[in-house]
């Protein structure tokens, strides 16, 4: 099969693992920098070109689109969808999950547990908003990643000034109940083909409340409860992702999903669990790309 890993980072662990496993399983795996792709659109003949070459004849793409190029990257993925190339993440789902507010709205409608969250741009009612969530509270940039746009405000005064600072800059933020009992830990559930294939708990190293591996957090394999497993699967399904990483907090009232990642990293989870996740992804691609081809043939 001809499989493209869409990535701008050739030396990234996940990119390298996917390339290596795809090659070892006998596929023609190519690394495609989506930022350097362009699409041609005309009647009945959609194409994608990469460095001048037509790459429309792919069987599958595995998008690993960075959050700073979501719009362009997802447009390239959408073009592959238009050409009936199998993708491990649909463009709509990539766009949806990059916005924390949008994801939480979808999750809440699907009945998935989430931390109580307020979204507002009403600057005159900051005091009321702070009062409704209470302190300590989490203030989150709607499009942040790697823990960079997440603030823990411990007092009303701190919360108010942080919120106002974001408003002045025109940044969309979420105010969220602080789940104190998660104690700087979160749970990453890795889903492939709508099933849980691995899970780990991430813990911050120092006294940071953020457990992101990019902030120095470390992962360890854990066993999920039935409820956690069900919640992760439900969250993935609600957002339209059959392969993803679901992040949740263990709270007194059960698992609460904080975000879902459409290009979950492989390094943390493979090291923490000792599982060969890259092979599971390529196996999943083999199964579905073949099915899609068959469907297209029958349809033709
Ligand atoms: N409501 C919350 N209560 C307690 N801790 C939280 C909460 N939201 C996030 N955190 C902590 O902060 C980290 C980063 O938050 P997250 O929403 O995942 O943003 P990012 O997209 O930047 O990773 C989480 O992994 C978790 O450890
Ligand atoms: Mg996160």
Image: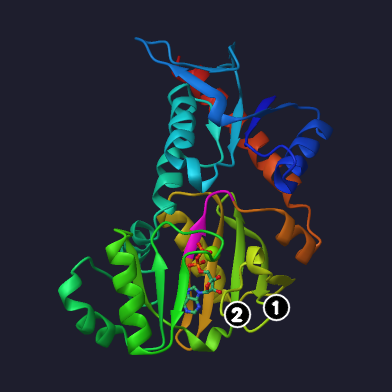
Q: Considering the numbered disc 1 on the image, is that residue within a helix, a strand or a loop?
A: loop
Q: Is residue 260 magenta?
A: yes
Identify residue for label 1: 205
Q: In this view of the protein, can residue 285 be seen by the observer?
A: yes
Q: Is residue 141 left or right of residue 31?
A: left
Taking the spot 54% from the left edge, 73% from the top edge, the residue there is 228
Q: Ligand 2: give its quadrant.
A: bottom right
- Residue 201: which quarter of the image? bottom right
**What stretch of residues is rendered in magenta?**
259-263
Q: Residues within 10 Å of mark 1 (few under 14, many from 20)?
A: some
Q: Nearer the viewer, residue 162 or 82?
A: 162
Q: How many badges with numbers are in the image?
A: 2
Taking the spot 28% from the left edge, 64% from the top edge, the residue there is 168
Q: Is residue 103 above or below residue 7?
A: below
| Image position, residue 77 (x, y; %) | 49, 32
Q: In this view of the protein, can residue 113 be seen by the observer?
A: no
Taking the spot 76% from the left edge, 66% from the top edge, the residue there is 272
Q: Considering the numbered disc 2 on the image, is that residue within a helix, a strand or a loop?
A: loop
Q: Is residue 259 above or below residue 162?
A: above
Magenta part, dominant SS: strand
Q: Is residue 205 above or below residue 168?
A: below
- Disc number placed over residue 208 in the picture, else none: 2
């Amino acid at each position: 099969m001809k499989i493209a890993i869409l990535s701008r980072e050739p030396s990234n662990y996940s990119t390298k693992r996917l390339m290596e496993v795809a090659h070892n399983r006998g596929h023609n795996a190519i690394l495609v920098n989506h930022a350097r792709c362009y699409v041609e659109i005309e009647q009945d003949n959609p194409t994608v070109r990469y460095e001048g070459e037509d790459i429309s004849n792919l069987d599958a793409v595995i998008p690993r689109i960075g959050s700073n190029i979501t719009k362009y990257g997802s447009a390239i993925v959408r073009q592959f969808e238009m050409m009936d190339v199998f993708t491990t993440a649909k463009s709509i789902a990539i766009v949806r999950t990059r916005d924390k507010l949008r994801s939480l709205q979808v999750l809440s409608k699907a009945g998935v547990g989430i931390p109580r969250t307020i979204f507002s741009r009403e600057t005159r009612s900051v005091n009321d908003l702070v009062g409704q969530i209470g302190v300590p509270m989490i203030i989150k940039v709607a499009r942040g990643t790697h823990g960079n746009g997440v603030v823990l405000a411990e007092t009303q005064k701190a919360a108010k000034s942080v919120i106002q600072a974001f408003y002045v800059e025109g940044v969309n933020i979420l105010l969220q109940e602080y789940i104190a009992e998660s104690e700087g830990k979160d749970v990453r559930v890795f889903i492939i083909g709508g099933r849980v294939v691995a899970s780990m708990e991430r813990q911050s190293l120092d006294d940071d409340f953020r457990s992101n591996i990019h902030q120095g957090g470390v992962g360890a394999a854990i066993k999920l409860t039935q409820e956690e497993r069900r919640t992760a699967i439900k969250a993935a399904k609600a957002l339209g992702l059959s392969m993803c990483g679901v992040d949740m907090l263990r709270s007194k009232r059960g698992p609460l999903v904080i975000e879902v990642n459409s290009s979950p990293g492989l390094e943390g989870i493979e090291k923490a669990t000792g599982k060969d996740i890259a092979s599971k992804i390529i196996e999943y691609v083999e199964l579905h790309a073949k099915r899609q081809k068959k469907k297209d043939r029958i349809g033709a």
